[in-house]
Amino acid sequence: MIRPDAELLLQITDLHARVEDQPILKGVNLEIRAGEIHAVMGRNGSGKSTLSKVLAGHPSYRVTSGSVRYRGEDLLALPPEERARMGVFLGFQYPIEIPGVSNLEFLRVATNARRGQKGQEELDTFAFEDLVNERLKVVQMDPAFLERSVNEGFSGGEKKRNEILQMALLEPLVAILDETDSGLDIDALRIVAGGVNQLATADNATLLITHYQRLLEVITPDYVHVMAAGRILRTGGKELALELEERGYDWVDEELAALELSENARTPLEVA
Ligand code: ADP
Ligand code: MG
């Protein structure tokens, strides 16, 4: 839902970032307000996961210029755990397994850290079980998954559901979901998408990173951004996703080539 007067939650300005000294993000601009659902689409290797990891504060990704403001504050100055506590959530493309750490306890500690930041009281084991049992319904997950180690031996679909369960408990203001649809069969996709839809409110925002239009048939984005070679090449409404599905990504390559050509042509003049 687009409301021009809604709070500006995330403001990314001319963001450049490197991995292993390789420039990957080359000037990303994006503004996300409360109540909005944004989709970022693009070919493999266009920098989508890099953007999500930079926002979450992954230590391997180095921001070289540009800024990210979260509710007016400098997000990049905060350590990753502080970003999470303040309500920035990243659902991973490849959720990691943490053998030996109980899923229930992991979720409880994370939830209490977030609640503390919001000025809510900590939940003890019993109170937390009530909350988690209620939130399990959002992703139609079996309580047996709480007794296991975090993601250990979970199928791809179960891992993605566990990510959405985390999101349901943490109640982030900005949820970044990186390829939450990848590896899901159609039933799991419906459940995961249903969870995301249930969790979207007028006060929070969702950034869906996806390769495919099929996720966007079940979650309707307010904006679709096409990413190519580390920047957002074009922004449109939900119809842009359909256009991509029909025309493929070839036109993106053409637009990108034209852009790079004009930039290269401009550079010597600017130097002179
Ligand atoms: P996408 O999610 O759009 O598929 P990524 O952000 O994962 O794209 O990757 C963008 C580019 O950055 C790719 O060329 C990829 O090989 C490179 N890259 C990403 N992470 C690393 C890393 N840890 N080390 C080296 N190169 C990386
Ligand atoms: Mg990716």
Image (cartoon, grey):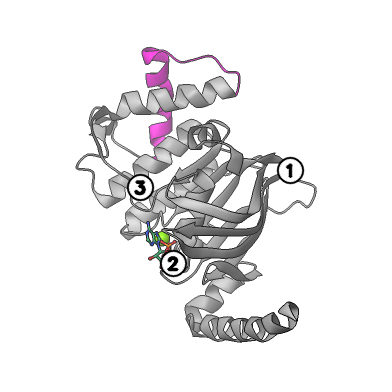
First reached walking from the N terminus: tag 1 or tag 2: 1
Q: Quadrant of the C terminus?
A: bottom right
Q: Quadrant of residue 96?
A: top left
Crowd around label 1: few <14 · some 14–19 · many ≥20 (10 Å): some
Residue occupying the far left of the picture: 153
Instruction: Determine which residue is flagged by label 1.
Output: 7
Q: Mark 1: which amino acid?
A: Glu
Mark identifier at residue 81: none
Answer with the quadrant where ligand 2 appears in the image: bottom left
Asked if residue 129 is among those painted magenta in the image, a careful observer would answer yes
The residue indicated by pointer 2 is 211
Residue 184 percent coordinates (x, y): 32, 57
Give the SS element for disc 2: loop
Please identify the quarter of the rendering in which residue 173 is found.
top right
**What is the crowding at mark 3: few (fewer than 14 residues within 10 Å), some, or many (at least 20)?**
many
Give the labeled residue for mark 3: 160
